Image (cartoon, rainbow, N blue to C red):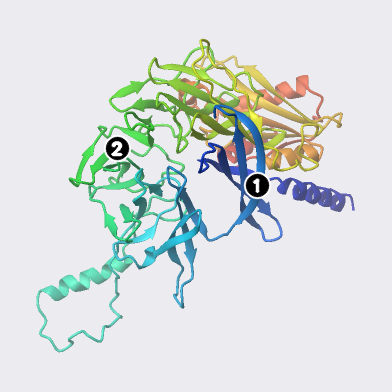
């Protein structure tokens, strides 16, 4: 009976917490007419326990600006719209005048869904194209690593990534009524038989999710629907393509097909290069030497600066990135004093530049927090602009007309949508912004600023002789429980991290009366490249020792139930959990 009550309580708490949506992305659009107000479109996901699926919807806000259009006067929500499950990608043109939507739909009596690309304006649907019927390529790729659905700056073309066209393959038992069975055999027959064997040859794939075999870059002319496949080197797989500012060329990342196509999601350091192809000359050139791993190229609004992230190929996954400007490197790998600990994000926001094209905005993990940084590309000064704001996890969603759209979360606060004006030139480092919070969703009962859960960051010192002698943990506990049981959670990876964001499982554990200990053992991201390297050759010893040290510290300094200690983790976290229950039962 007691067990049933506990299960019912857990179900009720999880159902309440599942009603809290999470922000996926946000976009700012300038309104038309004399007013220079902003329209904010934010995309959200929410658990739907009735259908056991993730529901998507968009929130629309109108931001009224001051007379000089440099600050926020009023924010109002206009409407909420559900997003159909068949929506795969949405892309707005630079002016916000046009929108492209990629959907998956049944047409007539087709055996499989067709990919439809629709063009919309404020007045409604302009035209639609069935990309599945295009014979120049295969399925459009929507995987986050390779995908690109981008309007050209002149709004005449759409750039996307698709699978290379494949000829239909037959086996020996399939016949064609047009075959001439009475013809005299010749030397070509053996070759045709070998070609039939291609149907049974395994294809290498890049994807841990939906298989990706050989991407190609495609350009669709919006007015006519004509599709052009760009010429790229045959030994690479292109992706993450963006337009040059004059719409005359494409910059893209090309992953090496040799020696193998292997997963790039969890092994993100596969070798690749940055390329440029001129549309007028059909000439492709490599912009990097192929010795590193490139991610997320971004032009500034003027098209005069191109930045991207560069990682060391091979070695540990998810290493520190170096922020690069084409033909010029910003060596932002590690700065003493813990003010900056490297770049670990795999992607810049689609728009990440100030209006003058000189300042770049991005987020990255700094030890236990995720902060937003401003980089002045003229004097190469880096500055944390959320240092003096509320502690937690900050993410850049969009930068437009010197306004910055962001999200904020913490272990006890679910997603908040935030907007701030980027101030003009100041004579001191910018350490905070005047943020406006969007009051769009009332926090549910269990997720509010007064939710009875306390959390703190604890830094622990180690006594061994490694290059890194400290690490951090996040300790969360229910305020009303005197001596709660303890759940120890080491993260997976191993080169990943817990930082101060909202996690539904940890939150529910606390609401059920458990204390939760999140351990960033040495080797976690957010502590510089030395922090990552220190775990190499020490897996199963250094990380295990750190988890044990963290537990011992809590047992000594916090009031928890020492007879009820549990471990919870997946992947490398599950590996460490097995070590813990085996070595320290």
- Element assignment for label 1: strand
Whether residue 332 sits left or right of residue 203 in the image: it is right
- Give the spatial CA distance, label 1 vs label 2: 44 Å
Q: In which image quadrant can residue 558 be found?
A: top right
Q: Nearer the viewer, residue 89 or 51?
A: 89
Q: Nearer the viewer, residue 100 or 338?
A: 100
Give the residue pinned by disc 1.
78
Whether residue 321 sits left or right of residue 12 in the image: it is left
> In this view, which residue lies farthest toward the top?
427
Q: In which image quadrant can residue 384 be found?
A: top right
Q: Residue at x 37, y 48 (%)?
A: 155
Sequence order check, earlier mark of 1 and 2: 1
Q: In which image quadrant can residue 489 be found?
A: top right
Q: Nearer the viewer, residue 523 or 326?
A: 326
Whether residue 390 sits left or right of residue 346 in the image: it is right
Q: Residues within 10 Å of mark 2 (few under 14, many from 20)?
A: many
Give the residue pinned by disc 2.
273
> In this view, which residue lies farthest toward the front?
34
Q: Position of residue 271 (x, y in %)?
A: 33, 38
- Element assignment for label 2: strand
Nearer mark to the viewer, of 1 and 2: 1
The quarter in which the C terminus is drawn is: top right
Q: Position of residue 144 (x, y in %)?
A: 45, 46
> As displayed, is residue 110 above or below residue 149?
below
> In this view, which residue lies farthest toward the right?
1
Q: CB of mark 1 within 8 Å of CB of mark 2? A: no
Q: Residue at x 30, y 28 (%)?
A: 326
Q: Residue at x 58, y 33 (%)?
A: 406
> As displayed, is residue 61 above or below residue 361?
below
> As displayed, is residue 378 above or below residue 156?
above
Q: Residue at x 38, y 54 (%)?
A: 212
């Amino acid at each position: 009976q007691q067990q049933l009550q506990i299960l019912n309580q857990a179900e009720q708490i999880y159902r309440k917490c599942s009603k809290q949506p999470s922000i996926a992305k946000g976009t700012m659009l300038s309104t038309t007419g004399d007013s220079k107000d902003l329209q904010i479109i934010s995309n959200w996901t929410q658990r739907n326990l009735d259908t056991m699926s993730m529901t998507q919807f968009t929130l629309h806000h109108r931001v009224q600006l001051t007379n000089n259009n440099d600050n926020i006067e009023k924010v109002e929500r206009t409407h909420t719209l559900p997003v159909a499950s068949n929506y795969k990608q949405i892309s707005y043109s630079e002016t916000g005048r046009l929108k492209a939507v990629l959907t998956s739909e049944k047409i007539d009596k087709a055996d499989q869904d067709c990919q439809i690309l629709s063009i919309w304006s404020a007045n409604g649907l302009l035209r639609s194209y069935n990309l599945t019927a295009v014979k120049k390529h295969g399925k459009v790729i929507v995987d986050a690593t390779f995908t690109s659905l981008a309007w050209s700056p002149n709004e005449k073309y759409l750039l996307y990534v698709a699978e290379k066209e494949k000829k239909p393959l037959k086996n020996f038992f399939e016949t064609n009524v047009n075959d001439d069975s009475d013809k005299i055999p010749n030397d070509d027959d053996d070759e045709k038989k070998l070609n039939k064997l291609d149907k049974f040859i395994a294809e290498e794939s890049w994807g841990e999710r939906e298989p990706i075999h050989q991407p190609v870059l495609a350009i669709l002319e919006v007015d006519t629907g004509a599709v052009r496949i760009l010429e790229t080197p045959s030994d690479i797989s292109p992706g993450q393509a963006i337009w040059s500012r004059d719409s005359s060329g494409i910059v893209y990342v090309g992953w090496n097909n040799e020696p193998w196509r292997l997963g790039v999601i969890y092994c993100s350091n596969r070798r690749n290069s940055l390329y440029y192809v001129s549309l007028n000359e059909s000439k492709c050139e490599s912009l990097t030497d192929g010795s590193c791993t490139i991610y997320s190229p971004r032009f500034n609004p003027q098209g005069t600066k191109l930045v991207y992230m560069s990682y060391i190929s091979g070695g540990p996954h998810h290493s520190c990135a170096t922020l690069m400007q084409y033909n010029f490197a910003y060596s932002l790998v590690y700065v003493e004093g813990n003010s900056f600990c490297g770049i670990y994000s795999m992607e810049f926001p689609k728009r990440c530049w100030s209006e003058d094209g000189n300042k770049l905005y991005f987020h990255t993990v700094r030890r236990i927090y995720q902060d937003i940084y401003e980089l002045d590309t003229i004097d190469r000064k880096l500055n944390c602009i959320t240092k003096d704001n509320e502690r937690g996890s900050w993410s850049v969603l969009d930068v437009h007309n010197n306004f910055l759209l962001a999200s904020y979360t913490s272990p006890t606060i679910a997603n908040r949508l935030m907007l701030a004006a980027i101030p003009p030139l100041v004579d001191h480092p910018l350490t905070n912004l005047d943020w406006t919070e969007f009051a769009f969703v009332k926090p549910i009962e269990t997720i509010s600023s007064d939710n009875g859960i306390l959390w703190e960051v604890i830094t622990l010192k180690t006594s061994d002789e490694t290059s890194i002698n400290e690490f951090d943990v996040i300790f969360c506990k229910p305020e009303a429980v005197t001596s709660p049981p303890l759940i120890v959670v080491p993260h997976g990876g191993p080169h990943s991290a817990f930082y101060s964001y909202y996690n539904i499982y940890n939150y529910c554990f606390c609401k059920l009366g458990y204390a939760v200990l999140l351990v960033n053992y040495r080797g976690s991201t957010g502590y510089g490249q030395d922090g990552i390297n220190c775990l190499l050759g020490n897996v199963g010893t250094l990380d295990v020792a750190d988890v044990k040290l963290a537990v011992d510290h809590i047992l000594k300094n916090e009031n928890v139930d020492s007879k009820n200690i549990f471990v919870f983790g997946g992947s490398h976290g599950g590996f460490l959990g097995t070590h813990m229950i085996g070595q320290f039962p």
